[in-house]
Image (tube, rainbow, N blue to C red):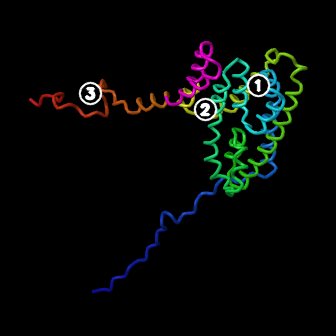
Amino acid sequence: MPEQTQIPTPERAAPDARPAPPGPAAPPDSAVIRDALGVGVAVGLSGFAFGVTSAGAGLGLLQTCALSLLVFTGASQFALVGALAAGGNPLTAAAGAFFLGVRNAFYGLRLSALLGYRASVRPLAAHWVIDETAAVTMAQPDRRTARLGFTVTGLSLYVLWNLTTLGGALGAEALGDTRAWGLDAAGPAVFLALLAPMLKTAVERAAAGLAVVLVLVTLPVLPAGVPVLLSALAAPAVLFVQGRLDRRPPDRGRDRNAPGTAPRPDAQEDPR
């Protein structure tokens, strides 16, 4: 018998041996600093509106500056002084401000893994975890640029926000009635401008729209600060409805003889 020879075949590479696609290139430090400073300066200037609004609500200079130094979350600060200016109970106003600030805890869970700071640094960094720093940090492709963006945004915003808060509180008497200038709407306007681009899905838009409706409907009839608390019910309500829709059985009224459906036995033609 003739000797059989085997033809060598090229070995196939394992599926996991293929090189991973390269990730996005890190931007230059100058671009990260430019973007971070842009956010810090743009938002930090609205601290002037907070200082004026807080002074108009009856808070003293030290109280106003202490809020910016220690609380440092614009939406919560405006919610607090807005409720106090409307004659709301201080405890209710503080509760509304607290629930608005809870969102920063969820930012912190994401940023903690992204930044990777040591345990001794995390308490100091947590004070700068707000909407603006979270947005700039999560836009970076790696840890080094994420830390740079977080630090520049947090430092510039914290310094400018407190300086403009002081200036607004000192100049409140010269401006007179803050409602005539519309400065009390500056804080909510900035917050909405930051929030709007994040509403990308129908569920998110529905939750935001329902929250607005709840506030507008209950604002004339409930004490100041309570409508903000009730608006938090929008998210679980929308998620509940979405869950019911996802579990809904398929439409049984569909044509039984439509393409893609199996014909019923009694609907087959008579073979006779």
Q: Nearer the viewer, residue 92 or 29?
A: 92
User: What range is drawn magenta here?
Assistant: 209-236
Separation of marks 1 and 2 at Cα, in angstroms: 21 Å
Residue at x 72%, y 44% (from the top left corner)? 127
Q: Residues within 10 Å of mark 3 (few under 14, many from 20)?
A: few
Quadrant location of the C terminus in the rendered image = top left
**First in sequence: mark 1 vs mark 3:** 1
- The image shows residue 232 at horizontal and vertical percentages of 57, 28
**First in sequence: mark 2 vs mark 3:** 2
Residue at x 88%, y 20% (from the top left corner)? 173
Badge 2 marks a residue whose secondary structure is loop
Separation of marks 1 and 3 at Cα, in angstroms: 58 Å
Residue annotated with mark 1:
186
- What amino acid type is highlighted by mark number 1? Ala
- What amino acid type is highlighted by mark number 3? Arg
**Magenta-colored segment: predominant secondary structure:** helix
Q: Nearer the viewer, residue 102 or 141?
A: 102
Q: Which mark is residue 256?
A: 3
Separation of marks 2 and 3 at Cα, in angstroms: 40 Å
Report the mark closest to the observer, 1 or 3.
1
Quarter of the view holding residue 55: top right
Residue at x 89%, y 25% (from the top left corner)? 171
Residue annotated with mark 2:
199
**First in sequence: mark 1 vs mark 2:** 1
Q: Is residue 213 magenta?
A: yes
> Where is 164 relative to 105, above or below?
above
- The image shows residue 216 at horizontal and vertical percentages of 61, 17
Quarter of the view holding residue 211: top right
- What amino acid type is highlighted by mark number 2? Leu
Q: Is residue 134 magenta?
A: no
Badge 3 marks a residue whose secondary structure is loop
Quarter of the view holding residue 121: bottom right
